[in-house]
Image (cartoon, rainbow, N blue to C red):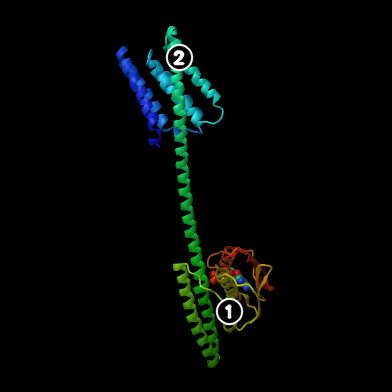
Amino acid sequence: MIAARLPGLIWIVIAYTVSLILKIKTVPAIEQYVIFTILILLFTTIYCYSNLFLPGRFWMYFVLQSFIVYISAFFTQDIPVIIITLYPLLVGQAIGTTGRKKNYLFLMILVLFTINTLVMVPLEIIDTFLLITLPTMVIIVSYAVIFFNQVNARIRTQYMLEEVELAHQQVERLTLHNERQRMARDLHDTLAQGMAGLKMQLEATNVYLTKGNDQRAKEIIVQSMKRVSELLADARLTIDNLRLNTKEKYDFQQSIIEEVQHFTVATGLECHFEFRVMQQLSSTISEHCLRVISECLSNIARHAKATNIWIRIEEKEKVLFISVKDDGIGFNTDMKINKDGHYGLLGIRERVRIIGGKVDIDSKKDKGTNVQINIPLQGAE
Ligand SMILES: Nc1ncnc2c1ncn2[C@@H]1O[C@H](COP(=O)(O)OP(=O)(O)OP(=O)(O)O)[C@@H](O)[C@H]1O
Ligand SMILES: [Mg+2]
């Protein structure tokens, strides 16, 4: 910022030094120089911090600076260097800085300049003075306008760069946040969900063992072992995805069929399954849909107390429609979906939102639950 004001500062120092040298030659009055120096220091400081005033409080800035120039000019009486140098600096700055309502400002500067000139320059030589001074001032003003325009452009660029940097940091924060959400969802939908399924299978084994049905208990244990292997593979795949951002190619229909089979074996519930999708779905859509359906099934197994489940997946006019319905106890869908310890429905909503779809959960007490999802397939990755 100070570097941008360097030419202005050099200009002020030259004006101050020349005034002082010429003055000392004529009137050696120390106290006058001290006051003059203080005033010029004040002018310089305000000039250096002009960004605190401009453009918002430009009136305060220019009135203050003009009066400092006006008063300092009296301390170098008969030597009009301050008038010739600092008024044009202010005019140039005013032209370069402010947009509207500056006619009054120029009028004020002109009045102060006229008074200063009339007081300091003898009447007999005023025409000669103006003849030399005015063209000089026009040149100084023109230079000042160009200079301040450049300074403003530089300051604006600086602000823009700062804003870009801020936006960049925000994007980084959001990316981090999204990654954390993705990890939480993946952990929930692989490990947590898998553990819940295994727990149910172990409970079933326990019941069969208690009843003395060792054969059935053994069957479930074998299935559970197979399920554990699959879960481990699933967990590894999730870790791979997190590490490498790779996407496994899904056979969507096959994956859903396997998921439904696991569910039926684990719960013994009847599952009516319809699949009518001709289009090859992208791995992103396939993966998210598979996770959503398996969370719906997990919820049915854990909460619904249902006897029948209907899963319908069909594609109509470039829209993938998924419905997972049960005839269980239902629940109140108005409750806060992301309350602590319950992340499944939240994950469903997040996944569907990522692939540009919509979720509608229809559930009534003792009337079952229907989770319906629409995903536009056109233009989807
Ligand atoms: N099909 C359903 N039938 C009855 N209640 C359901 C059903 N699906 C969800 N719920 C209710 O909605 C609540 C929230 O479900 P959500 O999947 O978000 O969490 P959760 O299953 O309790 O825990 P998790 O984080 O392990 O999934 C459940 O606790 C349950 O009360
Ligand atoms: Mg759940």
Quadrant (top left, top right, bottom left, bottom right) of the N terminus: top left
Q: Is residue 134 above or below residue 241?
A: above
322 or 369, which lies in front? 322
Q: Give the number of callouts.
A: 2
Is ligand 2 within 8 Å of the beta carbon of the residue shown at mark 1? no
SS label for mark 1: helix
Which class describes the residues within 10 Å of circle 2: few (<14), some (14-19), or many (20+)?
few
What's under tag 1, amino acid-wise?
Gln
Residue at label 2? 131
What's under tag 2, amino acid-wise?
Leu
Q: Is residue 285 above or below residue 233?
A: above
Q: Position of residue 171 (x, y in %)?
A: 49, 54
- Quadrant in the rendering for residue 25: top left
Residue at label 1? 254
Question: 9 left or right of 109?
Answer: left
Q: Position of residue 157 (x, y in %)?
A: 46, 41
Question: 78 left or right of 374?
Answer: left
128 or 256, which lies in front? 128
Q: Position of residue 345 (x, y in %)?
A: 58, 67
Q: Is residue 6 visible?
A: yes
